[in-house]
Amino acid sequence: MEHSPERSNQPLADLSYALDNAAKEASSRFQALAEAFDPATIRHLEDVGVAPGWHCLEVGAGGGSVASWLAARIAPSGRLLITDIDPRFLESLDLPNTQVLRHNIVTDPLPEAAFDLVHARLVLTHIPDRAAALARMATALRPGGWLIDEEIDISLAPDPASFPGEVRSSTFDGMLRVMEQRGVDHRFGRRLFAHLRALGLVHVAAEGMTSVWSAGSPGVAILRANYQQLGEDMIHFGYITAQQFEQDLAALDDPAFMMPSPILWSARGQRP
Ligand SMILES: C[S@@+](CC[C@H](N)C(=O)[O-])C[C@H]1O[C@@H](n2cnc3c(N)ncnc32)[C@H](O)[C@@H]1O
């Protein structure tokens, strides 16, 4: 793996989004995220009653799988706004009654008291100013509208000492470190319930989902995309060697590979 010669070995204070959608790994990541998480996400959206005619906002829509489901669900009379700081995968979706916006949830203007539903998944985990972003999302709800946010929690990281057979690699740890350098909070999902309560939302609830990731699973495809996108940085900052990286990447395809997935917390609250 080649390194960029002009970079210092010291981690820089770079808080831009760690998993830039311009990278070649982005499309496989979005496909794997959809396979791993859309069934749970859709169940939560159905639970709050998303229906034809709703006005919805999907924040940080990424590859657009949830946005596509929402657009079909609220048709023919609903309206959907889908945003992302880099909407390159959204612009070609051609969904009915939908507007796509290049938009930063922290800094760009957002309508207030406008939406029946505001949803985001795995977006605020990446944003250093996540509490402010969540508060803005709540303000965008009309009275009675639902906020659903789904974020990660790595409390169940692999622990081979306690659970023989689980794999925890230096590359996994290096990935976490590089992402934390870029402002990621790997346990934000766990805090969502308290945040939604503090925002004055009602009917607040949170549910966590986890599964075992093994070779061939969508979860392992997410790991592969993240390792490949962040591998150069992990090696550059000395968290792993190039040889270790190649071994750990290959181990993802080992039929014996297994690890508990991070928990995806799906939290909801309703504006009174
Ligand atoms: C890990 S992806 C998740 C994509 C999608 N929500 C999903 O679950 O499949 C995070 C997405 O958030 C977007 N994003 C990152 N920072 C953002 C910000 N400040 N405002 C809006 N979108 C942002 C990224 O461009 C990326 O598409």
Image (tube, rainbow, N blue to C red):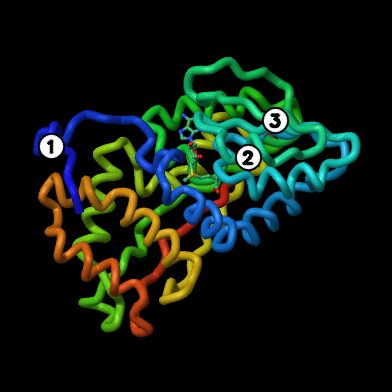
The quarter of the picture where residue 178 lies is top left
Residue 150 appears at what percent x and percent y? 54, 47
Establish if 272 lies above or below 2. Answer: above
Real-space Cα separation, disc 1 to disc 2, in angstroms: 41 Å
Residue at 34% over, 80% down: 254
Establish if 184 lies above or below 135. Answer: below
Residue 264 appears at what percent x and percent y? 49, 56
Mark earlier in primary sequence (1, 2): 1
Q: Does ligand 1 reach within 8 Å of label 2's beta carbon?
A: no
Q: Are marks 1 and 3 in contact (CB under 8 Å)?
A: no
Image-based side of 220 in relation to 141, left or right = left
Residue annotated with mark 2: 119
Question: Which amino acid, by three-letter code, is at mark 3?
Answer: Leu
Residue at 15% over, 59% down: 242
Q: Mark 3 falls on what kind of element?
A: strand
Residue at 67% over, 18% down: 112
Real-space Cα separation, disc 1 to disc 3, in angstroms: 41 Å
Establish if 43 lies above or below 83. Answer: below
The quarter of the picture where residue 4 lies is top left
Residue annotated with mark 3: 81
Which image quadrant: the N terminus?
A: bottom left
Residue annotated with mark 1: 5
Q: Nearer the viewer, residue 175 or 22?
A: 22
**Which numbered disc, 3 or 2, marks the residue closer to the eye?**
3
**Callout 1: few (<14), some (14-19), or many (20+) C-alpha neighbours within 10 Å?**
few
Mark earlier in primary sequence (1, 3): 1
Image-based side of 159 in relation to 220, left or right = left
Establish if 31 lies above or below 147. Answer: below
Question: Which amino acid, by three-letter code, is at mark 2?
Answer: His
Which image quadrant: the C terminus?
A: top right
The quarter of the picture where residue 233 lies is top left
